[in-house]
Amino acid sequence: MICKAGHYEPIAREGYVFFVPIAVLSFVLWLFGCSWSSLGFLLISAGVAAFFRNPNRFPPEGDALVLSPADGKVVQIVEDAHSDNLPGVSLKRISIFMSVFNVHVNRWPLSGTVQRVQHFSGRFLDAREPDASKVNEHNSVVLQTQEGDIEVVQIAGLIARRIACWVSEGDRVQRGDRFGLIRFGSRLDVYLPPGFSFEVPIGARVRAGETIIAKKN
C-alpha cells in the first residue's frame, strides 16, 4: 500500500471533533440572540482551529536530506545513541520539542517503507526531560529507507496525552507527507544510522517537512 498525504484539509482530522460542536454551539447561541456567549464560543472555536491547523509544506529536493518531522525547537542532539527498536548499531538522535503554539501535525523525515509500528504505554512527564523518550507514553515507527533504517518516535508529554499515527506496517511513505499528530504539542525523536551529520544546532527552530535537520555524509 502506498500511503499518501491525501487531499488538503486546513484543520487536522482530530481537530474536527472539537471544532465542529463548538462552532455549531456558537451559531445556535447567535440565532437565539445570545451575542456575547456566541462570540465567546466563536473565539474558542478559532483557538481550536489554530491548535489543529494543518498548513501545506513544500519539501526541498534531495533524497538524502532528512527533514524535520515536527515544528518546534531542537532540544537534544546525541551522537552516540541507542534504541531497543534498532538494536546492535550506534545511532544518532535528534529531539524536537513542540509547544502548544506549534503546528501539531507530524511529517516523514525520509521516504521509505514502514517496517514496524509500536505503541508503548507510560508516564506523562515534561517531554523536555532527557528520560521522557524512555518512560513516557510513546509511539515508535521504524522506517526502511534507501539510506538505512531509521526510527521516528512520537512522545506524549505533560499536556499532550493523545498520539495519532495514520500508517500501518508495509505502507510506503513519502518524505514530507503527514503521518500523525500529537495533540497539543510534545516531542518527536528521530534516530538515524551512521553516516549522517546534523545540519541544525540545539536551540534551532525547525518546520516540519521543510527544514533540513540532517544529511548523508
Image: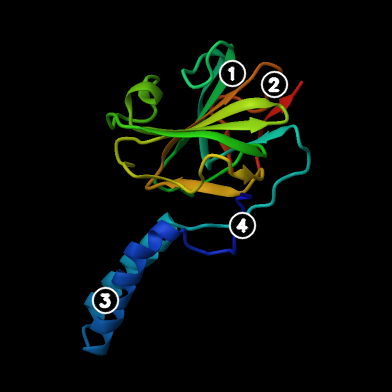
Q: Is mark 4 on a helix, strand or loop?
A: loop
**Disc 3 residue crowd, few under 14, some 14–19, many 20+, Cα 10 Å:** some
Q: What element carries label 3?
A: helix
Q: Which of marks 1 and 3 is nearer the N terminus?
A: 3
**Disc 2 residue crowd, few under 14, some 14–19, many 20+, Cα 10 Å:** some
Q: Which label belongs to residue 92?
A: 1
61 relative to 143, above or below: below
Q: Which of marks 2 and 4 is nearer the N terminus?
A: 4
Instruction: Give the distance between the C-alpha atoms of the residues marked 1 and 3, in whole angstroms.
Output: 48 Å
Contact between labelled residues 2 and 3, with CB atoms less than 8 Å apart? no
- Residue under the image location 21 percent in, 83 percent down: 34
Residue 105 visible? The answer is: no
Q: What residue type is labelled 3?
A: Leu
Contact between labelled residues 3 and 4, with CB atoms less than 8 Å apart? no
93 relative to 65, above or below: above
Q: Which label belongs to residue 196?
A: 2
Contact between labelled residues 2 and 1, with CB atoms less than 8 Å apart? yes
- Residue under the image location 73 percent in, 30 percent down: 146
From the viewer's perspective, tell me whether residue 86 is left or right of residue 111: left
Q: Which of marks 1 and 4 is nearer the N terminus?
A: 4
Q: Residue 149 versus residue 105: which sits nearer the camera?
A: 149
Q: What residue type is labelled 2?
A: Phe
Q: Which of marks 3 and 2 is nearer the N terminus?
A: 3
Instruction: Give the distance between the C-alpha atoms of the residues marked 2 and 4, in whole angstroms.
Output: 27 Å
Q: Which of marks 1 and 2 is nearer the N terminus?
A: 1
Q: Residue 152 versus residue 42: which sits nearer the camera?
A: 152
Q: Which amino acid does label 4 sit on?
A: Asn
For disc 3, the marked residue is 25
Rendered image quadrant of residue 55: bottom right
Q: Residue 141 versus residue 28: which sits nearer the camera?
A: 141
